[in-house]
């Protein structure tokens, strides 16, 4: 009998796992958003495009490179070669040497996950709020109270806090994920009539509410007008997560002007986005969670480290564990 596996979350971890398992099981992915990709996302508004989540990624392992090979061959994953500096108020910009190639997805960051989802059963706009045990099967429950079909395995590939409503207090061997800490992030998106008035395409920022800035329109395949993406540091966001959006914009506007001279009133488009879960302050410390007795599992970048490749590594590790217990 074919094993039925439900994966909650259609970010890179969930879709990687689905790709790995589809030859061994009947796999269905459920995503609460209206698009796949999670933080691999590009926001389009007012004739501008902004990668308001993950900015770029590296390929450090041979396994990740092999997994991405079709996307690399089809131009869905492409190198990005920006001039990157480090900025600090009152100091000269420092040019950052880059020892490894960095990549983006094209034409937007969600393109990689959209590519992976092409041959997978993915149901969007479906928030899973709990999972009920019925004899030897699990039945996911939607936010509206409706029950979905039964599955043999449930895998959470969502942020751990989204799984607390249905996950057990302890996984196998007494493992729990209640110590995992994620941080939020504010992304300020600015669109301009003319070229963004900076000499760099990417900038790390020290001793500032701002952690990173990128001339988003410089990335390969991006359409629309000149755009600048400003992201706050995780620590600063954590301290200001409940502040009103107008106050955040004022604080970031002042900081941006001090750093670059840019007055955001000159921007044709200005919009603020808040990620509740964006970076990993304290990871799980394991590559995944796996409970073969309960037939529950979890994976994601929060297990290892908050990198795009971390999401892949966690899902790849979980796939190997599932292969060992699934019927051959």
Image: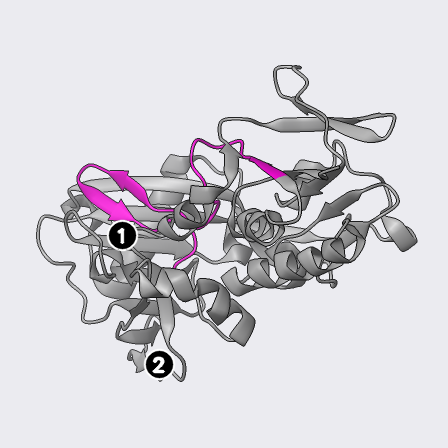
Image position, residue 189 (x, y; %): 29, 47
Taking depth in this image into account, of 245 and 223 the one nearest to the observer is: 223
Q: Vertically, is 154 above or below 235?
A: above
Image position, residue 118 (x, y; %): 42, 43
Q: On the rendered structure, is 10 left or right of 190?
A: right
Image position, residue 119 (x, y; %): 46, 43
Disc ID at residue 107: 1
Which residue occupies the extreme top position in the image?
A: 145
Q: On the rendered structure, is 287 left or right of 115?
A: right
Q: Residue at x 39, y 55 (%)?
A: 231
* Residue 2 sits inside the magenta stretch: no
Circle 2 is placed at which residue position?
Answer: 96
Query: What kind of element bears circle 2?
Result: loop
Q: Residue at x 91, y 55 (%)?
A: 173
Q: Quadrant of residue 163?
A: top right
Counting other residues with Cα less than 10 Å from the Cα at mark 1, is it few (<14), some (14-19), or many (20 or more)?
some
Q: How many marks?
A: 2
**Is residue 193 at least partly visible in the picture?**
yes
Disc ID at residue 301: none
Of labels 2 and 1, the one closer to you:
1
**Is residue 61 at least partly visible in the picture?**
no
CB contact under 8 Å: marks 2 and 1: no
Taking depth in this image into account, of 170 and 76 the one nearest to the observer is: 76
Q: Residue at x 68, y 62 (%)?
A: 317
Question: Which numbered disc flags the more N-terminal residue, 2 or 1?
Answer: 2
Query: What kind of element bears circle 1?
Result: loop
Q: Specify start and end residues of the magenta stretch as a single range.
A: 27-55
Calculate the distance from the C-alpha at mark 2 to the C-alpha at mark 1.
Answer: 26 Å
């Amino acid at each position: 009998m074919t094993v039925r596996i439900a994966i909650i979350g259609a970010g890179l971890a969930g879709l990687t796992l689905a790709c790995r398992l589809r030859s061994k099981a009947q796999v269905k992915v459920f995503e609460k958003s209206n698009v796949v990709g999670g933080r691999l996302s590009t926001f389009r508004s007012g004739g501008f495009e902004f990668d308001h989540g993950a900015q770029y990624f590296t390929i450090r392992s041979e396994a990740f490179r092999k997994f991405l090979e079709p996307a690399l061959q089809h131009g869905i994953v492409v190198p990005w070669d920006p001039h990157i500096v480090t900025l600090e108020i009152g100091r000269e910009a420092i040019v950052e040497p880059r020892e490894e190639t960095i990549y983006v997805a094209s034409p937007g960051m969600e393109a990689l996950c959209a590519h992976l989802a092409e041959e997978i059963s993915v149901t969007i706009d479906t928030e899973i709020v709990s999972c009920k045990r019925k004899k030897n099967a699990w039945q996911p429950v939607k936010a509206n109270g409706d029950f979905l079909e039964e599955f043999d395995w449930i895998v959470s590939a969502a942020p751990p806090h989204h799984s607390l409503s249905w996950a057990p207090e302890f996984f196998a061997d007494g493992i729990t994920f209640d110590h995992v800490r994620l941080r939020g992030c504010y992304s300020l998106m600015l669109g301009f009539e003319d070229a963004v008035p900076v000499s760099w395409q990417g900038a790390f920022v020290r001793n500032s509410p701002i952690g990173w800035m990128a001339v988003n329109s410089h990335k390969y395949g991006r359409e629309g007008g000149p755009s600048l993406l400003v992201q706050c540091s995780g620590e600063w966001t954590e301290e200001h997560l409940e502040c009103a959006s107008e106050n955040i914009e004022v604080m970031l506007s002042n900081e941006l002007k001090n750093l670059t001279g840019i007055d955001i009133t000159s921007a044709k488009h200005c919009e603020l986005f808040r990620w509740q879960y964006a970076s990993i302050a304290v990871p799980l410390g394991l590559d995944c969670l796996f409970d073969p007795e309960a037939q529950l599992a979890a994976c994601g970048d929060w297990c290892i480290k908050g990198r795009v490749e971390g999401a892949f590594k966690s899902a790849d590790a979980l796939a190997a564990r599932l292969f060992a217990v699934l019927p051959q």
